[in-house]
Amino acid sequence: MSDGAQSAAGWRAPELEEELPGLRLLIGEALHTREQPLTGSSPPQVRRRLAELSNRYRGARAVGIRREPVPAAYRVFFRHIGLEPDTERTPIEAAILERMLRGGFLTRCLLEDVLLLALVDTGVPVWALDAESVDGSLGIRASLQGEPLGRAGEAPVLPAGRLVVADSSTALAILFGELAPGHVPHAGTRRVTLFAVQVAGVPDLFVEEALWSCRSALEQL
Amino acid sequence: MSKYEQPVIDRNGPDRGPTIARGTELARLQAAASAPSQQRPAAERAARASLRAQIARLERERSAIVAERFPHICAPVAMPDRPSGGPSLLDLGELERSRDRLAAAVQDLRAKVTEREEHERRAREQLQRMRLEPGRYKFVRLPVRDLGQGVCGFWEVRPRLGLIGMLAGWWQLKLSSGCPLATGSRSTRDPGLRR
């Protein structure tokens, strides 16, 4: 059951609202209450769920996934923002391809497994940031020339016009891309800011479900 | 809306990319970035929306062809016309190039589909002839792949009862048992059970 009340919509730069009206950022927060650290191994129930999902995705489904409504919406959106989905795969297609190549959804660490479960279950990608490193609310905007990705000293520099997820002062992640170094949750992280990117054609319910799935797994609801 | 029905756009309009120096306050930057968008002509915006709709339609068609025709037709790996550094808001020219590239890819796939359908039609006719007059097609093999029915297996005209059938002219059309087992044949995967 989804609990949309715990998700908030992020802000969008005016030019994005105008050009890509279906693009939304949904944000949730989770308090990590499990004993295992976020970067530690997953509990048995999470690993079991990954194995169940591995059995659900076989070759035929992998080939046809691009026609399913939610993955198709992300493919189209990738083209709208200049990404070629056959070379830079959408998150769900990348996960399914990985499953095909490795024979299953392999466990990595608790946080990555939880995000993967949400992705495979709903088709909606979710990312996590260390909530302590986020300043204000998150939103989507275009980067500025020479703007750093994150507040860390070794932060890479962005060119102008790159679409990023940012807080009130800094770009924290490239849209559908890498997170800023220094803002990724680590072993000691207790509070996690989750965000999901919704595009035109993806129902609200799926996005809220993805965030709820992550929250419930981390908070042991 | 077809390519020829789109509104004519003045591409020499104001540059809309934010070019503000690093370290400036975010509020000022956002205000500066959004200002040119207010001056953008509505026609150009409408054209971009139209191009995005066309791209969406073409992408859905391309996905449908690839999903339905796999493994006989695969999507060629597309090479973007510019090194993709990441996601960005595309301008009219970039959207047009993206649309044109996608349209060409879809056109290419449509041609492959037509070619493939013709190939399968000829194979079905051949199968029908083999079924009606097996004696005329002795030992002829027709892969089921050619019929679009799968990947492994053959239709083959073989003599009934082996040598007796060959001598007596008893020919029949038979379908092979399909794909080999992933674990190999019984004799190779567990030779110890053989007696």
Image (tube, rainbow, N blue to C red):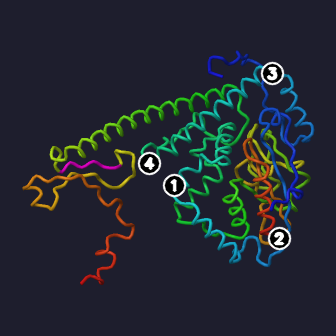
Q: Are marks 4 and 2 on the same chain?
A: no
- CA distance separating discs 1 and 4: 10 Å
Task: Identify the image quadrant of residue A131.
Answer: bottom right
Q: Which residues are magenta?
A: B139-144
Residue B187's label in the rendered image is none
Residue A60's label in the rendered image is 1
Which of the chains bears the disc numbered 3? B
Which of the chains bears the disc numbered 2? A
Residue A193 lies in the magenta-colored region: no
- Tag 4, which secondary structure? loop
- CA distance separating discs 1 and 2: 35 Å
Q: Are marks 4 and 3 in contact (CB under 8 Å)?
A: no
A135 vs B98: above or below: below
Nearest to the observer: residue A186 or residue B98: B98
Q: Residue at x 66, y 40 (%)?
A: A76
B37 vs A128: above or below: above
Question: Which residue is disc 3 drawn over?
Answer: B42
Question: Which residue is disc 2 drawn over?
Answer: A219
Q: Judge from the rendering whether residue A85 lies leftward or rightward of residue A8; answer left or right.
A: left
Residue A199 x, y percent position in the rendering: 74, 44
Q: Looking at the picture, which amino acid does disc 3 mark?
A: Ala
- Tag 2, which secondary structure? helix
Q: Are marks 4 and 2 in contact (CB under 8 Å)?
A: no
Pick the quarter of the image with the N terminus of chain A: bottom right
Residue A93 x, y percent position in the rendering: 61, 52
Q: Judge from the rendering whether residue B157 lies leftward or rightward of residue B191; answer left or right.
A: left
Closer to the eye: label 1 or 3: 1
Residue B71's label in the rendered image is 4
